[in-house]
Image (cartoon, rainbow, N blue to C red):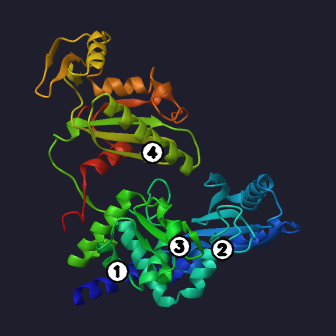
Amino acid sequence: MHELGAVISKALPLCEPKPAESSRITAAAEKCKSLVEDQTKGMQEVVEVIFGGSFAKGTWLHRDADVDLFVKISPSVDLQEFERMGKSIGLLALKKYRPKLRYSDHPYVEASVDGVRVNVVPCYDVEQGKWQSAADRSPFHTEYIMRNFGAEQKRQTRLLKSFFKSAGIYGAEISVGGFSGYASEVLILKYGSIEAVLSAASDLRPRQVIAVNDQFDPDIVKGFSSPLIIIDPVDSRRNLGTAISPESVGKFVLAARAFLANPSMRFFGARSRSSPSTKKIRQNILIVEFRHGDKSPDIIWGQLKRTLAAVAKQLELADFEVLRSSCISDEKGAAAMAYLLQSLTLAAFTKRKGPEVFRKQDSSSFLSNTKNRPHVTWVDSEMRIVMLVDRKETDAILYVKSLFGKRLTNSGISKDLLARRSMLRIYRGSQRRISGLAKEAVDEIVSTEHYIHP
């Protein structure tokens, strides 16, 4: 335990923002708040403009700070006008900083101001529990944490966020599917310290419920389907674990066990992975590179993940065994997907099993089906009719090319994901030198996280 405490003490200064950094971010935040307030002067529907998120709560990480500004709008405003106002206020207030529209559950505005990412988000000025938009809880989250957190809880939260970041599971956005900043704060509030959080994580059970003060409604919990359930203390009907993928929960458990068994600074540094030196694995990797349109990151990642899964499903239906897959986007127009297959080529024929011979009608139907004429037919030891037939698809590269071409309509691939079809590249991992986003996607599926084999 002495070693663990020493590592945590050493990691803390790496997580905490420096005084100059805090001053710079605070100055940018105050500037933007004034700009937004000036833009909303005279708007009777706007109640106030407030800070939210980790900046307001004092839990943001060194070199990783966003400023969230919430524009609280009267609940009497209908949703269409609410969204229009939110977009207009943000775009006009930050017009000098080339603002962009972003989309989550509803539109918001993002801009980089003096090197600081600033989000202007509309929300309704409602009473707790009377939510009208997805962002309405956020001011209550901020108030709740500020009311219950002291300096030590903020320090412990920064450590936990840094731990999550090193494990590649920090952030609730679709691209990560990890633990949000607020979920991190709730975990610290529940357990008191990063050591206690990791100790609890090391013994997690499937669908474990985590609730501050252990207060939750079992009947409501039954409706949650995530592998880890974290009750929002501001809204007991909301599960903070919904955005956390099963993979991230699994990584959390293994990383917690590895750290407790062998405390090290590597758990608070940059994400590290080990890759095999053999070329055998890369020979079985299929890579898809393309350009996508200029869209909100949430939209891009949603389409990308759906397409990744759709292609994997189609490959499986064609008898190609997909061992692992990954996708990556620079969120500016370039993207890549990678699939590790058991084999990129299949035999020219396959075995097709039919019914038992006792099922007379089914047997007759099976034997009379001439869509795929068999090379050989026999009865096996289970007394089932078996045929050896030609396989429709034998080359994964050619098959995936057809999915993005003539079979696109029924493939499940997001139709408007590809911006320029001429930029589509589909190839074998050993076919050419892999670089850029393709290399990142490949590294994801051929690498082992540092905590898997501590």
Q: Nearer the viewer, mark 2 or mark 1?
A: 2
Q: Secondary structure at mark 4?
A: helix
The dot on residue 11 is 1
For the residues bearing labels 2 and 3, Cβ distance under 8 angstroms:
no
Say which quadrant the N terminus sits in: bottom left
Q: Position of residue 194 (x, y in %)?
A: 37, 81
Residue at 63 percent across and 55 percent down: it is: 105
Up/down of 144 relative to 371, above or below: below
Q: Nearer the viewer, mark 3 or mark 4?
A: 3
**Pointer 2 or 1: first along the chain:** 1
Q: CA distance from mark 4 to mark 2?
A: 30 Å
Q: Secondary structure at mark 2?
A: helix
Under mark 1, the amino acid is Ala
Q: Nearer the viewer, mark 1 or mark 4?
A: 4
Give the labeled residue for mark 4.
305
The dot on residue 69 is none
Under mark 2, the amino acid is Pro
Along the viewing direction, whichever of 171 and 359 lies nearer the viewer? 359
Q: Nearer the viewer, mark 3 or mark 1?
A: 3
Along the viewing direction, whichever of 412 and 437 lies nearer the viewer? 412
